[in-house]
């Protein structure tokens, strides 16, 4: 959970996730949407990968990045617990 | 959003939020649940307050901390957008 929230605490990374909602994309395609260097985009993609928020897959010459919806499902359940006031702490801190 | 996610990226702070789901509590009551110093608990409470995840209210001699459910509602909406794959980026990065 720490890595997930750390990864989400950066606006550029949240914007990358927003882009990936629509389409799987290569690092180059993602970089076209930002005014920041390609190495910087690569760094952000590595943080997102490390947090399991995005997956990467080789297709021919290219590596495509996609949202890992499983982790968003976990995050959703975590937030819903607070919203509903459910008194279940046993899964805290995973 | 950055502050919210940064605040959530720490296990102790997530555990404090879990405690506050059940009851509003003073800093002293919260500290009883942890093996860490009171100044350290105060620091974590300040980070949570700064992110608007908790509210504080004076009642007589004591200051009580409570969950700010409004912010959890915003967070829920943000996560639901990803889970549902909704293509709405206009509120990103608030």
Image (tube, coloured by chain):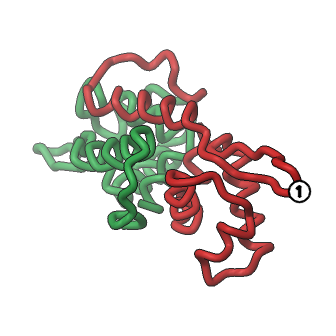
Chain colours: A red, B green
Residue A2 lies left or right of residue B31; in this view the side is: right
Q: Nearer the viewer, residue A81 or B83?
A: B83
Q: Nearer the viewer, residue A59 or A70?
A: A59
Q: Locate residue B90, reporting x and y percent.
A: 34, 67
Please name the residue shown 45% across and 26% down the image: B33
Chain ID, mark 1 = A
Q: Locate residue A3, reporting x and y percent.
A: 65, 44
Please name the residue shown 75% across and 46% down the image: A56
Please name the residue shown 83% across and 57% down the image: A62
Q: Is A86 rendered above or below residue B17?
A: above
Mark yes or no: residue B65 visible: no
Q: Is A8 rendered above or below residue A88?
A: below
Label 1 environment density (alpha carbons within 10 Å; few <14, some 14–19, many ≥20): few
Mark yes or no: residue A57 visible: yes
Q: Locate residue A4, reporting x and y percent.
A: 59, 44
Q: Locate residue A38, reporting x and y percent.
A: 76, 75
Residue A83 lies left or right of residue B85; in this view the side is: left
Quarter of the image where the C terminus of chain B is located:
bottom left
Q: Nearer the viewer, residue A88 or A33?
A: A33
- In the rendered image, which quarter is residue B66 located in? top left
Name the residue tied to disc 1: A61
| Figure disc tally | 1
* Residue occupying the far left of the picture: B60
């Amino acid at each position: 959970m720490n890595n997930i929230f750390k990864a989400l605490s950066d606006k550029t990374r949240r914007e990358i996730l927003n882009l990936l909602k629509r389409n799987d994309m290569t690092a180059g395609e993602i970089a076209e949407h930002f005014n920041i260097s390609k190495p910087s985009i690569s760094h952000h993609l590595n943080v997102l990968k490390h947090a399991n928020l995005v997956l990467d897959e080789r297709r021919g010459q290219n590596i495509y990045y996609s949202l890992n919806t499983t982790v968003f499902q976990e995050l959703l359940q975590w937030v819903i617990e607070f919203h509903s006031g459910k008194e279940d702490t046993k899964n805290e801190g995973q």
